[in-house]
Image (cartoon, grey):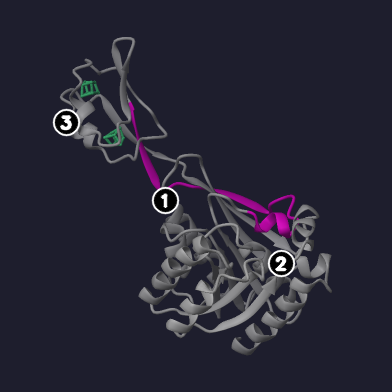
Amino acid sequence: MEIVVASGKGGVGKSTITGSLISLLSKDYRIASIDADAEAPNLHLIFNVREWEKVEEFSAAKSAKINDNCINCGLCDNACIYKAIYEKDGRRWIKEYLCEGCAACKMVCPVDAIDIFDTISGWLKIGKTKYGPLVSAELDVGKPNSGKLVTEEKKIAREWVKNGEAEHIIIDAAAGIGCQVISSLSGANLALLIAEPTPSSLSDLKRIYSLANHFGIESKLIINKDGINPDFRGIEDFAKENDLEIIARIPYDSSVPKSLSSMMPLVEFSPDSPASKEIKNIAKIVVGWL
Ligand code: SF4
Ligand code: SF4
């Protein structure tokens, strides 16, 4: 079973819920965890991973560099739709963080003054936790290919399932509906969608639900911070209109930030807190799907 915890919107408690679910499920199952938010990974913080067992460079991007053949003709300026080329001190230079490595500049250059080279997009990180193996990723600043990085993470976790190190995979997806989230959903069995009772969360819930549907992945809904906005019924109405089952309502709980700063899953930091009790109920539901 491969379950993706996604929300569309950031800050709704996705990693808090994922960390606690993994903590609970790992008591009876071998769980492989994926932190699929390569731009802002944080699951390792909840699991208190201080040292990685393995860190691998991930190279899927290309970049351009201007060499000494340049005659400063300026033909490459218009070829670069990313506006990565600029002139300074009588010659052309490339802003590496804007360059997508498309090689359009190289094609128009009359004197072969542009070299295209492989560049590091980020890093894959593997850690052993008391909850089972964790694969995380970190995208380098300004680099593309976050989706490919997540795909690599999934290959590693699926290998753990193949060799018996894990039985199930739980994925903590990034916010939004971009490449990373698409890669997270790809081939998954179920999407656990997290929303909070606010208009902005509703807007993002609609997008992530539509994305999961597009890929034919069944979704279940968890409302987090339930009760913070009692007059707002948008999430419930959307769930009803779309036949989206609400499996849990987690109340607002002041233990959550304390558990994060203690680098512990909430259900361990404060097992009897209102949110922990509800997450334990969710874990029982999830066990029914495994
Ligand atoms: S490789 Fe593409 S993005 Fe990079 S400088 Fe050349 S044209 Fe611009
Ligand atoms: S097209 Fe080639 S020669 Fe002309 S400015 Fe660009 S890099 Fe230099």
Residue placed farthest to the bottom in the image? Answer: 288
Whether pointer 2 and pointer 1 mark residues with C-beta atoms closer than 8 Å, the reply is: no
Badge 2 element: loop
Q: Residues within 10 Å of mark 2 (few under 14, many from 20)?
A: some
Residue placed farthest to the top in the image? Answer: 89
Look at the image and say whether residue 63 sits in the magenta stretch.
Answer: yes
Q: Residues within 10 Å of mark 1 (few under 14, many from 20)?
A: some
Q: Quadrant of the C terminus?
A: bottom right
Badge 1 element: loop
Badge number at residue 145: 1
Q: Which residue is mark 2?
A: 252
From the Cβ of disc 3, is ligand 2 less than 8 Å away? yes
Residue 213 image position (x, y, % from top left): 39, 76
Where on the picture, by quarter, is residue 90?
top left
- Distance in Å between CA atoms under marks 1 and 3: 25 Å
- Distance in Å between CA atoms under marks 2 and 3: 58 Å
Q: Which residue is mark 3?
A: 108
Q: What's the magenta region?
A: 42-65
Residue toward you, 46 or 165: 46
Q: Nearer the viewer, mark 2 or mark 3?
A: 2
Residue 148, above or below 233: above
The numbered mark, 2 or 3, whose residue comes first in the sequence reads 3
Q: Amino acid at mark 2?
A: Tyr
Where on the picture, by quarter, is residue 210?
bottom left
Q: Is residue 214 left or right of residue 174?
A: left
Q: Is residue 34 left or right of residue 61?
A: right
